[in-house]
Amino acid sequence: TTTTMMWIEGKSPLDVAHAYVASFFALIVFGFIASYQQIKYQEIQAADSSALPIDWKKIGAVVLILVGTIATNILLDFPAIGVWAAIFISSIFTITPWKEVGHAVKGSLFLITLVLCASLMPVESLPPASWQSAFVLGFVSSVFDNIPLTKLALQQGGYDWGVLAFSVGFGGSMIWFGSSAGVAIANIFPQAKSVGNWLKNGWHIPLAYVIGFFIMLWFLPWTPKP
């Protein structure tokens, strides 16, 4: 989401591509540890995938949502219209789980409130754009949703957008309410809302963030963009 925000603001995809360097090494760090945790909790069991039917109507609904989002983003600069139009059209030919809206309301209000708070913050009060401030923003994004943080950084300008993309994107996963995905998961599984359990079982995420960040800077020094 945060990287898409940068693209919408006119940042080139090439300006954020080097975030993959940090992501690659971060994945190596937490991937092995998380895989071990998963196997220890529940071993992988082979399933008969041939017995799973494919619901082509639902796949068509997903494709329609993606097309609607892209089209209205390009034509109207308002992708939400395309999302909801596609959802209503899809409800004609497939069953739409409208009860899920109830699960999403709390999370949506939470994110909207954070974005509103961020919009009230004066940009001139922010620290100057630097790799140090980008590094700290990664930790801040774990307790203050990364969407408003990215909006503030875009308004301020002067960041290396690849470094910022990794910081706010990956850093938000350190705690459940630091990312939209974490909020969505916690709304469905309330036990995920325990910060203590999140850190206890996901301690390798902050470690992977730090290692990935500094390896990226080692390979590709800080290069701010106007």
Image: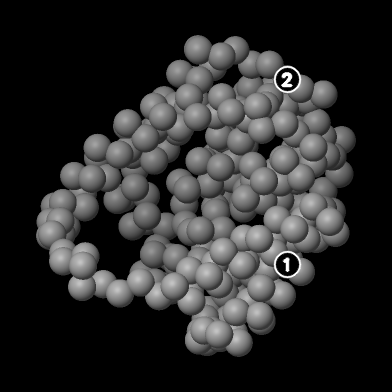
Image check: 67 left or right of 203? right
Q: Residues within 10 Å of mark 2 (few under 14, many from 20)?
A: some
Residue 67 showing in the rendered view: yes
- Amino acid carrying label 2: it is Pro
Q: Which amino acid type is marked by label 1?
A: Gly
Q: Is residue 174 left or right of residue 80?
A: left
Query: How was this image coloured?
Result: one colour
* Image vertical order of residue 206 relative to residue 185, above or below: above
Residue 215's spot in the image, x, y percent? 45, 18
Instruction: In the rendered structure, find residue 168 and report the number of the disc placed on it.
Output: none
Residue 174 located left or right of residue 120: left
Q: Residue at x 67, y 26 (%)?
A: 15
Quote the CA–CA distance across marks 2 and 1.
34 Å
Residue at horizontal 56 percent and vertical 42 percent from the top:
169
In this view of the protein, which residue sits in the foreground, 94 or 20?
Answer: 94
Where does label 2 land, which residue?
A: 224
Which residue in the structure is indicated by mark 1? 82
Q: Nearer the viewer, mark 2 or mark 1?
A: 1
Camera sees residue 136: no
Secondary structure of residue under mark 2: loop
Residue at figure coordinates x 50%, y 41% from the top left: 170
